[in-house]
Image (spheres, grey):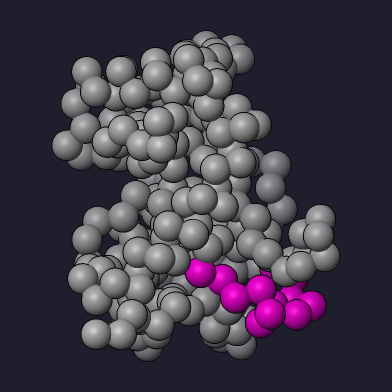
Amino acid sequence: MELIGERWSLPIIREMMLGPRRFSEIRADLPGLSAKTLTERLESLEQTGIVARTALPPPASVQVYRLTEWGLALEPVLQELGRWAVRSTLHDPTLPITPVSLMLSLRTMILPERIGDLALTVRFAVGDRHFTGRLGRGETGQGELAVTPADADDPAPDLVFAADAGFPFLAVFYGKWPRGEVQALRVEGGPGPVQRFIDLFDLPPKVGG
């Protein structure tokens, strides 16, 4: 907790979990976080070896912040905190969720035992952010959903889910609202594979009173 327990540290780490981010991008995705606090947290995380500064290659040539290998190893910590938090009866799924947080949530709430031999490439568009998900067996042989920022060289997706914000995803994937009632979530793909993919996700039960 001495390394990552300061306010805003974990959300900042979370926003870099899928790849390097610019200072302005991190701040834009975390309303309420001041430039001063973000600067202080990034400097602290860099000093402890969790974050590193680097420059993107030309033509971008801009400074970005990325997680080190040690920093990336915090994803299981974030996942366990996520599973723990959504069990609260005070959890409000209508609150805003950042695109990266949504992708990490899907990686967390997928039920590997339901995947079986299902293998798919899925494109997620959340506002102006695009991600590629690869569903299949990971290095351990267990089913998983790998997610990376979308790239022009990615294979054509089998399924596409797109919305201007995160809530339509949450309503369909976790709330199990009928897709016909969530017009804000645009879906491409056969109805069978689409529904089978959605059925891979579920939230843990709420805690007792």
Query: Relative to 143, does residue 179 appear above or below in the rendering?
Result: below
The quarter of the image holding the N terminus is: top left
Residue 84's quadrant in the figure? bottom left
In the rendered image, the quadrant that contains the C terminus is bottom left
Taking depth in this image into account, of 116 and 51 the one nearest to the observer is 51
Residue situated in front as seen by the camera: 41 or 147: 41
**Percent of width and height locating residue 5:** 36, 37
Query: Is residue 119 part of the magenta span, yes or no?
Result: yes
- Determine whether 62 is above or below 188 in the image: above
Q: Is residue 196 left or right of residue 113?
A: left
Residue 179, percent from left and from top: 39, 83
Residue 45's place in the image compared with 158, above or below, is above
- In the orientation shown, which residue stands out farthest toward the front? 2
The one nearer the camera, 44 or 92, is 44
Left or right of 167, for residue 187: right
Q: Residue at x 55, y 21 (%)?
A: 49
For image coordinates 66% across by 68% down, the residue present is: 158
**Residue drawn at point x = 44 percent, y = 23 percent:** 45
Magenta-colored span: 109-121
Q: Residue 173 at what x, y percent from top left? A: 44, 76
* Res. 33 in view: yes
Q: Residue at x 43, y 77 (%)?
A: 203
Q: Is residue 184 magenta?
A: no
Count of residue discs: 0
In which quarter of the view is residue 73 placed?
top right
Q: Is residue 54 left or right of residue 154?
A: left
